[in-house]
Image (tube, rainbow, N blue to C red):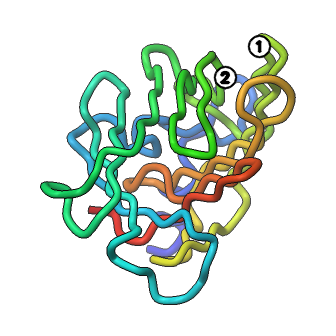
Amino acid sequence: MIPLLLALACGKDDAATGQAVFDLTEYSGLDADGSWVYRDDGSDELPDEATLLRARDQGGGTVELRRGYRWADADPVGEVVWDTSDGLTLTGLHLLPVAWTGSMRLADLEPANGDQQVRGGSHCVTDDTQVVSTYYADYDDVLVFDCTGDGLPGTYAFANGVGLVRAELDGLTVDLVAPW
């Protein structure tokens, strides 16, 4: 039973290379009406409910961000925009202190460990070997994209069945508090 679970966690093997490849839709969290709660205060302490970021998939790759106790009465503070038509490309992030629009490709539809995306001066490398810790949980089935160069350099971690669980950018760290 344990080998079967490990095989499922590692994705499927590419017939040509024998390397594990992953179905990006299982990691992005953007194929349904997802919602998440994040913190961006950089603390490990109990979060202040009033400062939490509420995120909700609006469809078409747009995730709206609101700050406050509940989605219904929280203040809109920004958005993250993804293009998932042929992989995963970040096209916008607006959450102070970051305001960026462009095109930074993180991955193909079926990324493998070590894959590199080099486009328009940005360079993103896929890593499936890390354990990512957030305020909410430790995730071991993750795809981490380490991006440098132009675009919005940083580290983006997506957990299987959850979506974005952690992003570390210059001047901004977003950490998952709850996957709902």
- In front of the other: 114 or 84: 84
Hey, what amino acid is under mark 1?
Arg
What residue is pinned by disc 1? Answer: 119
Q: CA distance from mark 2 to mark 1?
A: 7 Å
- In front of the other: 4 or 176: 176
Residue at x 62%, y 46% (from the top left corner): 97
Left or right: 83, with 91 as reference point: left
| Image quarter of the N terminus | bottom left
Residue 105 image point, x, y percent: 65, 22
Q: Compared to 104, does 24 lie above or below? A: below
Hey, what amino acid is under mark 2?
Met
What residue is pinned by disc 2? Answer: 104
Left or right: 84, with 56 as reference point: right
Left or right: 26, with 146 as reference point: left
Residue at x 63%, y 28% (from the top left corner): 107
Q: Which mark is residue 156?
A: none
Among the 4 quarters of the image, the one containing residue 125: top right
Chain-order first, disc 2 or disc 1: 2
Among the 4 quarters of the image, the one containing residue 52: bottom left
Residue 180 image point, x, y percent: 26, 62
The residue most toward the left is 72
Q: Compared to 142, does 105 lie above or below? A: above
- In front of the other: 92 or 2: 92
Q: In what element is the residue under mark 2?
A: strand
Residue at x 38%, y 54% (from the top left corner): 161
Q: How many marks?
A: 2
Residue at x 32%, y 51% (from the top left corner): 66
Residue 159 image point, x, y percent: 50, 56
